[in-house]
Amino acid sequence: MRPGPLADDSENEAAFVDLTVQGSRLSAGLHPPQVCVNGHFLPRAYGARTVPVAPGPIQVAVVDGRSRSVSLDFSAEAGQHVAVFYAPPVHRLAKGAIGHERQRRPGKKFLFSIPLVMALAYLVLLSVAVFVISRMASDAGL
């Protein structure tokens, strides 16, 4: 893909992408994702920023540290501000989420199901152990 134009800050010629990379170094990871607007890479950072772009078709692509990417294509007119939100995934197996409204972090259901599966496995092993011990006790005549 060939880089599209970014615009200067003049209000009458540019459209604006109000980009928010949700999270922080504590909640989403030490390395912020790489954001690319119309083929131009932006400095890595969490939080909100405004990026001036040329009016017309716009592509915002985000690549996290695991080479998983998501993108959003839209059009903007001169002077228009378009909100774009990116939420990084909770774990390494999920992709991030991107959209025009605040996003939920993908992967929470999977992450929270792990303790439930572990607890279920523990209960099954415990019941098998109780059954085996009771069977051994009955065979021994206790």
Image: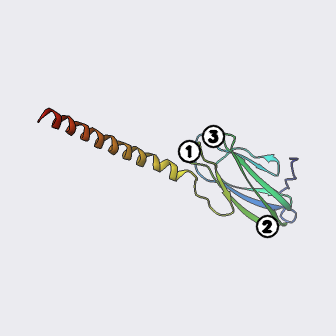
Q: CA distance from mark 1 to mark 3?
A: 14 Å
Residue 63 appears in the picture as rendered = yes
Q: Is residue 76 left or right of residue 88?
A: right
Picture residue at 21% right of the left edge, 38% below the top: 135
Disc 1 + disc 3, Cβ < 8 Å: no
Q: Residue at x 87, y 53 (%)?
A: 5
Look at label 2 and name its amino acid: Gln
Q: What count of labels does the image hold?
A: 3
Characterize the local packing of mark 1: few (<14), some (14-19) or many (20 or more) Cα atoms within 10 angstroms.
some
Q: Position of residue 114 (x, y in %)?
A: 46, 46
The amino acid type found where label 1 is placed reads His
- Earlier in the chain: of badge 2 and badge 1, it is 2
**SS at badge 1:** loop
Give SS at disc 2: loop
- Residue 104 quadrant: bottom right
As drawn, 101 above or below 108: below
Residue that mark 2 sits on: 80
Residue placed under numbered mark 1 in the picture = 91
Q: Which residue is mark 3?
A: 31
The image position of residue 101, as x and y in percent, is 65, 63
Residue plotted at (37% across, 46% down): 119
Q: Is residue 85 visible?
A: no
Between 85 and 130, the residue placed more toward the observer is 130
Q: Which residue lies most toward the left here?
A: 142
Q: Earlier in the sequence, mark 1 or mark 3?
A: 3
Q: Which mark is residue 57?
A: none
Q: Nearer the viewer, mark 2 or mark 1?
A: 1
Q: Is residue 6 above or below residue 43?
A: below
